Every structure is written in C-alpha cells, then in structure tokens.
Image (cartoon, rainbow, N blue to C red):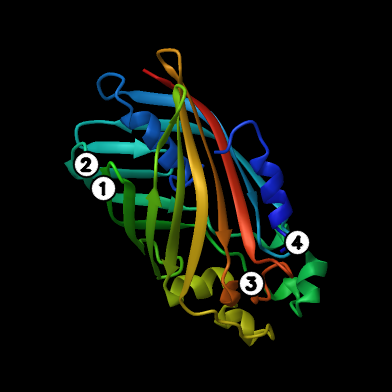
Amino acid sequence: MKKLPLFVLLCAMPFATMAQTTDPDKAIADEGTAKRGPPRWSLGMGAVVNDSPYAGEGTRVLPFPLVGFQGEKFYFRGLSAGWNFIKNDSFELSAFAKFQPGGFRVKDLGRSELAANGIDSRLLEDRDNGLGVGFSAKWKGAAGELEAEVLADAIDTSGGQEISLQYGYPIAIGKGRLTPSVGATWLSEDMANYFYGTLDEEVARGVVDYKPGSVVIPHVGASYFRPIGKKWSLLGFVKYELLPDEISNSPLIERDTDGSASVFIGFSRRF
C-alpha cells in the first residue's frame, strides 16, 4: 500500500480533520449551519492536499478562497450551489450543482511511471474536470447523520453519474465538533471509464484498451469545525479512499496503489 504512509503522516497533524463531510463545500456547510445568528456570508482561505493515485503525479496542493452563503432557500458552499426544498432540524432535501475536480493534465503525470505500466504518455489526452447536477438528502438525529447524493454529468465531460452515501457521528470536543464518517461512492461505467480507463481515441493510437466499468469506492474520514471567537471558524477534514481493483489495476494509476488520501484545512469569517 504505497499511499498509506502519507495518510498516516497527514493524520498526525494537530487535529484530525475535509471529510464528506469530505469536500471543502461540506466543511463550509458546518460553518454555515452553525446556530450563531441569521443567514450570512462567510469568507476565508483554505488549502487541500491530495495524494494523487495517478502515475507519477505525486501530491497535489490546491489553495483556494472559501466562500459560503446560507439563505432561506439558496446556498453557496465553495464548490457547490443549491436550493433547499426542505430544510429543518432533522431533514434537508436540495437540488444542487457541484464542481467535480477529478481530472488530470498529462504533463503532470510521470513519463517513466506510465512507461512502466506500458503507456506512452505522448498518446494520452487530458481528463477534464466535471460539473454535476442532482439532488442531496440529509437526515440528522441522535444516532448521527446520514447523507445521500445523486449526481449526473451536466457538461458531458464523461456522460456518467455518481451516487454517494455517507454516515457520520458528531462528537463535541470542547468548543469544537469532530465528525468521524464512513461512506461509499458509486461511479457509473461512463464516469469510471473516463477518469480511470483509456479513451477510444487513445486506443486507436496504440494505447492498451482498459475499461474498469462501474465501481464502488469506499472511504473513511473525519471533519472538524470549531468557532474561534464570535466570527471566526476553523474548518477541516481528512479522508481516505480505498480504491477497488478495477481502479488500482488501471495503467493510469501508480503501481502498488490501492488508496488515496486528502486533507483540508481552512479559516473562515462570518459577516
């Protein structure tokens, strides 16, 4: 398990934290739904560190602004925006759109690592990021939080769909809240083939034909939210995805890789 040591190192940071609640927008949601006054904007800065599973790409570091807004119906949370049809203390149902940063640039991959997998990098094409649209539902109660999302590709990047399900249990730690979570994401055949397989045009150039088909990717993680004073908040998460054999055996993936870790940390101020 080549990627696991980095995950352990990242977990040794001062706090165990981006889980789904594991995307930046979900961490922002913690801040936006905290009972600390009327709906408001929040602004801040954060960064995601991702241990990429793609051959030779290594660690991705992405700093970005944190922008959030929770109104009566409309919300905006970092990478997603949506409309609440139902929102109360125990249940939330929303239609939303979400940026999906799952692609790669061939120039960022390792030529020697791809060659070791039998791939000539000059014959590959970039994989574009996507935009998904769909529905989300979230239940909250004494037993924890259950969240489901159904998304379809809105801009024909892959032409696929994804369904995710996650359970988390919030734990109060001093003034903060830590939410360990477990879940899984199903990728349709079109989506998995686009991001983890070889394209038809690449195969026509001589690249090996590899199509993983639909896959299920389990994950574990934890999110953290802590108010700092009356207006500031600390947000974060850590997430580890266990890649199924259909993905880890792809010639686009680093050898001996069966998992991928992500860490997010950020600060946000409410207005």
Could you say which is closer to the camera, residue 142 or residue 252? 142
Residue 62 percent coordinates (x, y): 61, 42
* Callout 2: SS: loop
Residue 248 has which mark?
Answer: 3
Q: Nearer the viewer, mark 4 or mark 1?
A: 1
Residue type marked 4: Gly
The spot of residue 184 in percent (x, y) is 44, 62
Quadrant where the C terminus lies? top left
* Residue tagged 4: 56
Q: Nearer the viewer, mark 2 or mark 3?
A: 2
Q: Quadrant of residue 91?
A: top left
Is 224 positioned to the left or the right of 260 in the image? Answer: left
> Which of marks 3 and 4 precedes in the sequence?
4
| Label 1–label 2 contact, CB within 8 A | yes
Q: Amino acid at mark 3?
A: Ser
| Residue 197 visible (yes or no) | no
On the rendered image, what quadrant is the N terminus found in? bottom right
Q: Mark 2 sits on what residue?
A: 90
